[in-house]
Amino acid sequence: MVLGTVTTISYEGPDPQDAKLPLTTYEIRVEQVLHGSAPNVITIGQTGGVLDGTKYEVDGDPLMHTGDHGVFYLQQAKTGPAAGRYFVLGGPQGRLIVEQDGTLSRVGSSNVNIPTDMTVDKLVSAGGSAN
């Protein structure tokens, strides 16, 4: 679990897991490792993106944008064409947005219930659970 900011976005060809959909990769500058371990910069893959001029998004899991600041619950792919790349666990449920006032909010149509005063520090104190 890391706190970081999206610094670079790359739209790739078809997702190795589902050739009908594009794959987008994001470079994330890790500001703080909240649980586990991670390098200073990681690459995250997300199903969806732009392919042949058409934008594709998984319902309820919007694409990220440069400058997005958040908490990411991650798993690293160990084998296959995505080996070494990180993926967000649970789609939008594995991402929390850090708002300008420092509070956290959910992404898209995620059903994660977050107290209105939840901050990164409180999240870490709660063992990573936003509820």
Image (tube, helix red, strand yellow):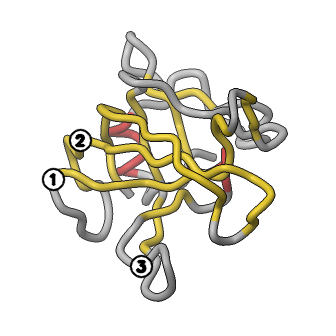
Instruction: Report the mark closest to the observer, 2 or 3.
Output: 3
Q: Classify 10 Å Cα crowding around label 2: few (below 14), some (14-19), many (20 and above).
A: some
Looking at the image, do the residues carrying marks 1 and 2 touch, with CB atoms under 8 Å apart?
yes
Which residue does the image show at 38% across and 28% down from the upper left? Answer: 69
14 relative to 75 in the view: left or right: right
Determine the CA span between mark 1 and mark 2. Answer: 6 Å
- Decide which of tag 2 and tag 3 comes sooner along the chain: 2
Q: Classify 10 Å Cα crowding around label 3: few (below 14), some (14-19), many (20 and above).
A: few
What label does residue 83 carry, if any?
3
Q: Residue furthest bottom?
A: 79
User: Which amino acid, mark 1?
Assistant: Asn
* SS state under label 3: loop
The foreground one among 1 and 121 is 1
User: Which amino acid, mark 2?
Assistant: Arg
> Image quadrant of residue 42?
bottom left
Q: Position of residue 96 (x, y in %)?
A: 53, 37
Determine the CA span between mark 2 and mark 3. Answer: 19 Å
Residue, disc 2? 29
* SS state under label 1: loop
> Image quadrant of residue 86?
bottom left
Q: Position of residue 5 (x, y in %)?
A: 32, 33
Looking at the image, do the residues carrying marks 2 and 3 touch, with CB atoms under 8 Å apart?
no
User: Which amino acid, mark 3?
Assistant: Ala
Q: Quadrant of the N terminus?
A: bottom left
Q: Position of residue 38 (x, y in %)?
A: 24, 64
* SS state under label 2: strand
- Decide which of tag 1 and tag 3 comes sooner along the chain: 1
Residue, disc 1? 40
61 relative to 77 in the view: left or right: right
Q: Residue furthest top?
A: 101
Which residue does the image show at 37% across and 37% down from the upper left? Answer: 120
Which residue does the image show at 75% across and 37% down from the upper left? Answer: 57
